[in-house]
Amino acid sequence: MSEPVVAAKSPFEVEVEAGKSYAWCACGHSKSQPYCDGSHKGTGMVPKVFKAEKSETLWLCGCKQTRNGPHCDGSHNDL
């Protein structure tokens, strides 16, 4: 399995809708950050699919080093 690529050294601020499913890019290769566009194929990594419990603003990890994917945990501060 490959290591994820740092897509950004800060989180992505996104609006999510209650009940809707999202696929967060875990590999860092997607051109549609922070969401998956299928670029992970061949990396051994898969996106983290989550369903929004409520409509709100979230901060999704851009560095792909979080231990709490898809949410930012501040890991980018150690890069």
Image (cartoon, grey):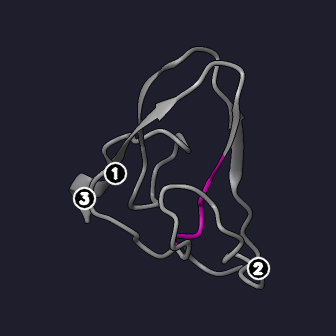
- Viewer-proximal residue among 13 and 61: 13
Q: Secondary structure at mark 3?
A: helix
Q: Which mark is residue 41?
A: 2
Q: Secondary structure at mark 1?
A: helix
Q: Which mark is residue 7?
A: none
Q: Quadrant of the C terminus?
A: bottom left
Residue beneath the point at 27% across and 54% down:
10
Tell me residue 31's x, y (percent).
51, 73
Q: Are marks 3 and 1 in contact (CB under 8 Å)?
A: yes
Residue beneath the point at 40% across and 42% down:
72
Residue type, mark 3 in image: Asp
Above or below: residue 51 compared with residue 5:
above
Q: Nearer the viewer, mark 2 or mark 1?
A: 2
Q: Which residues are magenta?
A: 23-28
Q: Which residue is mark 3?
A: 78
Q: Which residue is mark 1?
A: 75
Residue beneath the point at 46% across and 50% down:
66
